[in-house]
Image (cartoon, rainbow, N blue to C red):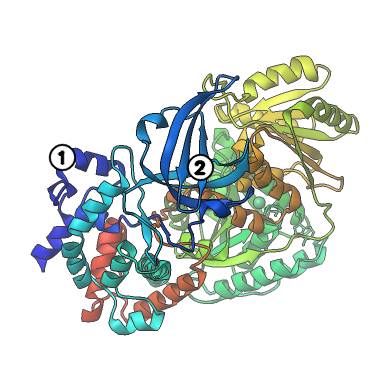
């Protein structure tokens, strides 16, 4: 068994048909061991149902065709662009394929090659395909007569043919080891409705039908999900067991006067979230909950209610924000909202003078301050709390998991509430934050005017500035956002610094224009932001540093330059800075780029539902890119498809939870394989959560 397992850990170089040179090429695909090779499965499959006969191609279709190259060459155009063109033929007819700007393909693609090309069909002196993707196939590779053609991710110098050959030659012995590594019992597999590992890998590499390959993918996706959920389930258990939590007791001594003085009624979503949080807090186990809500959904007041419950029970709360500006803003908001309530609040910031700091620290340590608001300063050496019962982290994606834990360690066993304005679909929330319970604010307070969002080409910039001037003349303020800080020669983007120069000296010489960006020192940055909050700055030029949390209701215009460079969710987050007051707000996206990027940006003009936007973003860009998923410790899922596998994810979570409930240490013989898998997949992290 050990010798056999060893086979999969063997460096790929020593496999049949590989050797040092090919090992190097395989390395570029991330393939280092035999196991990596076995898991290097096709990216897609083609068969008679996915490949179109050339004669039936119509302009406007997006199609995959297979044909033989009958002629080829490089065409210069008048603009100096060189185009590689090839004409391919199948049994039904001919079509021209055109690769603008890629003359070098003339060396890779030869007359007589069999090509698979996929892309849109256009009209240009006749029908033409502009391949998004092409693959040089083996002579007898087909996708007809019921045959399925697997397309592997490959790399320069390593053709499909070679890659397939290497895999085929080594597949059988690798599969026989994989069969023995099956961690799930036959009964478990049957319950989920997925094939065993060996079979899954077989159909992924040698599918009889595309549907069979899809079943194989589901099996591997289930493995990814189940073991991550197992890790999460153990973390949850550990969190709950470590120390008992505080059973907070509601007396209404503070909550009632607060409710009576509150100038608005809570939304249904807020009421639901408060109920969930209060139930957690009343229970004797520690709360570990995520409050997720789109920008402007009103998370602060929910947090405040939780803090009041803690205070009523005789405990302190700490609220940690990622920037000084935001911490100060929270401090002010809380003070205003708590005007009629007898409750001392302290503010702790890094830049405070010695006296101020001593006072704040004293109030926290002595217990006089029942709410302490601050930045990272809250988790500095020397900060102590008399009786910390609740730790709240705002905009949690700006903090690491460690900082979250450090704040929670400041008390005996405080309940923990983290808040995030990054709306993500439920399936992804369960994956990213599987160790947390989740409350969602999926509704905005009533009465806000929706932001109007428009898309403008560069040529309309003059008019956009006129509009900004009009709004400023009416007493409003504006943001102008740029994607980069310094002018880069390579990328032709306007930098915030250069534009600030231009805007303040030429476009708005008579207005007060400020600049803020990430490379500025924190104090300098805060000083500018304070100027904007106070209304001294009328037009604020900035990079994306403004995206987190700040609240300037008088700012009603946001112009975003090079909008095509931003992700949709990020644009939505930025846009959340306006539309906070009673006046109509406007977001103008100035963009260049092809129809694809315009199409993408149009989504923002059409909806302001952050969840919908995040879902679109995920569809377009994939998961890895989004929300710094890596930072959250989200593993590189290779098989999980967040759109297809939501059910599977929920099943995996349930199964994992049941396992941990019945056998927390995974000591039963039938769970030995789970331990092993956790170790292989998560190593160090898996051991961190060993319980007991
Ligand atoms: P976010 O979820 O983005 O942190 P905030 O907590 O800053 O949102 O709330 C945004 C604004 O909405 C604040 O000015 C807040 O006072 C207001 N607000 C919150 N809840 C309600 C409500 N139920 N009705 C009306 N206004 C509300
Ligand atoms: Mg907030």
Q: Residue 20 carries which label?
A: 1
| Local crowd size for mark 2, using a 10 Å CA cut-off: few (<14), some (14–19), many (≥20) | some
Residue 486 x %, y %: 56, 22
Residue 528 vertical placement versus 557 (above, below): above
| Local crowd size for mark 1, using a 10 Å CA cut-off: few (<14), some (14–19), many (≥20) | few
Residue behind mark 2: 131
Secondary structure state at the residue bearing disc 2: loop
Residue 481 x %, y %: 68, 33
The quadrant the N terminus occupies is bottom left
Secondary structure state at the residue bearing disc 1: helix
Ligand 1: image quarter: bottom right
In the image, is the residue at mark 2 within 8 Å of ligand 1 by its beta carbon? no
In the image, is the residue at mark 1 within 8 Å of ligand 2 by its beta carbon? no
Taking the spot 52% from the left edge, 43% from the top edge, the residue there is 95
The quadrant the C terminus occupies is bottom left
Depth check: give the residue in front, 583 or 462. Answer: 462
Foreground: disc 2 or disc 1 = 2
Taking the spot 80% from the left edge, 41% from the top edge, the residue there is 586
Depth check: give the residue in front, 144 or 381. Answer: 144
Q: How far apart are marks 2 and 1 (CA)?
A: 33 Å
Mark 2 or mark 1: name the one nearer the start of the chain: 1
Taking the spot 54% from the left edge, 34% from the top edge, the residue there is 354
Identify the image quadrant of residue 502: top right
């Amino acid at each position: 068994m050990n010798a056999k397992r060893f086979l999969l850990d063997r460096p790929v170089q020593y496999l049949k048909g590989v050797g040092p040179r090919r090992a190097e090429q395989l390395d570029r695909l991330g393939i280092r061991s035999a196991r990596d090779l076995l898991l290097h499965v096709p990216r897609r499959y083609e068969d008679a149902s996915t490949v179109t006969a050339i004669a039936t191609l119509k302009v406007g279709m997006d199609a995959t065709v297979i044909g033989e190259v009958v002629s080829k060459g490089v065409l210069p155009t008048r603009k100096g662009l060189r185009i590689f063109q090839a004409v391919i033929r199948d049994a039904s007819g001919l079509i021209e394929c055109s690769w603008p700007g890629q003359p070098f393909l003339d060396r890779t693609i030869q007359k007589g090659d069999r090509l698979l090309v996929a892309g849109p069909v256009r009209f240009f002196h006749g029908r033409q395909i502009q391949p998004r993707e092409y693959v040089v196939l083996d002579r007898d590779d087909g996708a007809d007569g019921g045959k399925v053609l697997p397309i592997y991710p490959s790399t320069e110098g390593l053709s499909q043919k070679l890659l397939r050959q290497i895999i085929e030659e080594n597949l059988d012995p690798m599969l026989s080891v994989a069969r023995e590594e099956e961690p799930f019992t036959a009964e478990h597999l049957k319950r989920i409705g997925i094939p065993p590992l060996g079979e899954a890998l077989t159909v992924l590499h040698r599918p009889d039908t595309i549907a069979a390959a899809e079943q194989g993918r589901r099996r591997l996706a289930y493995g990814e999900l189940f073991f991550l959920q197992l890790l999460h389930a153990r973390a949850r258990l550990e969190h709950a067991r470590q120390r008992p939590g505080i059973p907070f007791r509601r007396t209404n001594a503070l909550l009632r006067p607060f409710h009576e003085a509150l100038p608005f009624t809570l939304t249904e979503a807020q009421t639901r979230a408060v109920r969930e949080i209060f139930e957690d807090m009343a229970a004797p186990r520690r709360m570990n909950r995520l409050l997720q809500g789109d920008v402007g959904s009103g998370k602060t007041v929910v947090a405040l209610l939780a803090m009041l419950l803690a205070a009523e029970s005789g405990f302190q709360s700490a609220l940690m924000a990622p920037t000084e500006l935001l911490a100060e803003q929270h401090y002010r908001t809380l003070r205003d909202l708590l005007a009629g309530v007898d409750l001392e609040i302290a503010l702790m910031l890094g830049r405070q003078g010695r006296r101020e700091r001593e006072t704040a620290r004293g109030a926290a340590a002595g217990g006089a301050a029942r709410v302490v608001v601050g930045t990272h300063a809250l988790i500095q050496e020397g900060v102590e709390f008399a009786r910390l019962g609740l730790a709240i982290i705002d905009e949690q994606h700006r903090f690491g998991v460690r900082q979250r834990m450090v704040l929670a360690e400041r008390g005996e066993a405080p309940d923990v509430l983290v808040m995030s304005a990054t709306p993500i679909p439920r399936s992804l929330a369960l994956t990213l934050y599987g160790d947390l319970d989740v409350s969602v604010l999926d509704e905005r307070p009533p009465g806000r005017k929706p932001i109007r969002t428009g898309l403008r080409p560069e040529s309309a910039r003059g008019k956009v500035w006129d509009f900004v001037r009009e709004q400023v003349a009416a007493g409003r303020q504006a943001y102008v956002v740029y994607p980069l800080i310094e002018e880069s020669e390579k990328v032709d983007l306007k930098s915030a610094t250069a534009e600030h120069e231009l805007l303040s000296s030429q476009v708005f010489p008579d207005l007060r224009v400020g600049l803020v960006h990430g490379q500025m020192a924190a104090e300098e940055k805060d000083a500018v932001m304070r100027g904007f909050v106070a209304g001294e700055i009328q037009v604020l030029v900035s990079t994306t540093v403004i995206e987190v949390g700040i609240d300037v209701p008088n700012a009603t215009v946001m112009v975003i330059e090079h909008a095509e460079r931003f992700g949709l969710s990020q644009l939505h987050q930025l846009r959340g800075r306006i539309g906070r007051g009673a006046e109509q707000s406007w977001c103008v996206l100035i963009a260049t780029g092809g129809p694809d990027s315009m199409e993408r940006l149009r989504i923002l003009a059409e909806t302001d539902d952050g969840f919908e936007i995040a879902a679109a973003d995920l569809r377009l860009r994939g998961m890895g890119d989004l929300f710094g998923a890596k930072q959250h410790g989200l593993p590189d899922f290779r098989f999980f498809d967040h759109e297809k596998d939501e059910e599977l994810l929920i099943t995996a979570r349930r199964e994992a939870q049941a396992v941990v409930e019945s056998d927390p240490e995974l000591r039963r013989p039938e769970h030995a394989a789970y331990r092993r898998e956790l170790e292989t997949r998560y190593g160090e992290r898996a051991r961190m959560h060993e319980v007991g």
